[in-house]
Amino acid sequence: MRSKREQAILDNIKEWESQLVEQEATDFQKMFDKWVHNTIVKLPEKKRKDFFTKADGWLFHLHALIQSSQSQLEARNRILGTSRLFNESIEQLEDLKALSIDQLTYIAEQQTARHRLYSFVQGGATGAGGLLLLTADFPVMIALNVKAVQLIATSFGHDVNKPYEMMLALKVFHASLLPGRLQQYAWYNLLQELEQEDSFFYEGDEAVLQPASTEIILKQILKTFSIYALRRKLFQGIPIIGMAIGSTVNYRLTRNVTEFANRFYQVRHIVEKEKRA
């Protein structure tokens, strides 16, 4: 039976879904979408497929690298340690599913708060640094946010070392990056994934990045150019404007990613709990 808190959280998410649906593309966004579509269509099909295949491969390798890192293992142990404050009998990730949704959300938000701070600091460092830090900003930002989604999934009792959980986490990550007018479609596709029976292997479409992902890359390029152009605007020898742009953009991105991932895993927890009942 669904608790009052679970229903309240679902109602809140339904309201957010309605806001997504109501978002309409502006004339500029429609023109931009058309330009992106026409640009991609002009590319030879083989090159187009190769690009997205290689980008997906890079994401999979990044996921595996992060997941096998010492810091991720320590974070996993911290999550288990925090969960035992609520239930001393918890021994493995699967046991976390016995906790209430508020307890799981609290554990997840502990992890996301750290990553929002990391993202803020990293963005500020990029704005203050030279060309090397600017070049490294995009891969570092991707790594930080992939890790944040992994930790949210882990906080809700899912082992992202499993192929199914890995693919789902990457799809959540990608969907969280999309602009609102496109995010609603990715959200409903993710909800359909929840209808799949528990599986070790992923049985759906394994492609993560899509042509819509191009906007994410272009926004990042625009941010990089803005910081680069303003690098000589100094206040007492410090590039304040560049630091402000870098830290604000990166913080907002991580906030959007973590809020989206939190909502998805909250819905998943409620759906799976009702299936087990």
Image (spheres, rainbow, N blue to C red):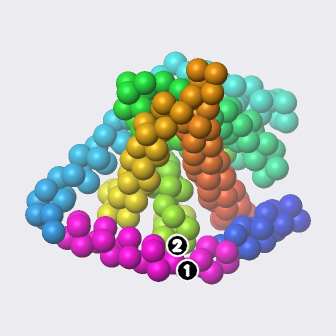
Amino acid type indicated by mark 1:
Glu
Residue 52 appearing in the image:
yes
Q: Residues within 10 Å of mark 2 (few under 14, many from 20)?
A: some
| x and y, in percent, of residue 216 in the image | 43, 55
Between 202 and 39, the residue placed more toward the observer is 39
| x and y, in percent, of residue 263 in the image | 67, 58
Q: Residues within 10 Å of mark 1 (few under 14, many from 20)?
A: few
Majority SS type along the magenta span: helix
Which residue is at the far right?
A: 4
User: Left or right: where does residue 50 sit relative to residue 31?
Assistant: left
Q: Is residue 200 above or below residue 212?
A: above
Whether label 2 touches label 1, CB < 8 Å: yes
Q: Residue at x 79, y 63 (%)?
A: 9
Q: Residue at x 62, y 53 (%)?
A: 256
Amino acid type indicated by mark 2:
Arg
Residue identifier under label 2 = 181
Quarter of the rendering occupied by the N terminus: bottom right
Q: Say which quarter of the image contains residue 47.
A: bottom left
User: Left or right: where does residue 221 sit relative to residue 151?
Assistant: left
Which of the two discs, 2 and 1, labels the residue nearer the N terminus? 1
Q: Residue at x 42, y 50 (%)?
A: 222
User: Left or right: where does residue 125 sit relative to residue 85?
Assistant: left
| x and y, in percent, of residue 242 in the image | 54, 36
**What number is the disc on residue 24?**
1
Q: Say which quarter of the image contains residue 132.
A: top left
Q: CA distance from mark 2 to mark 1?
A: 6 Å
Q: Which residues are magenta?
A: 18-41
Magenta stretch encompasses residue 90: no
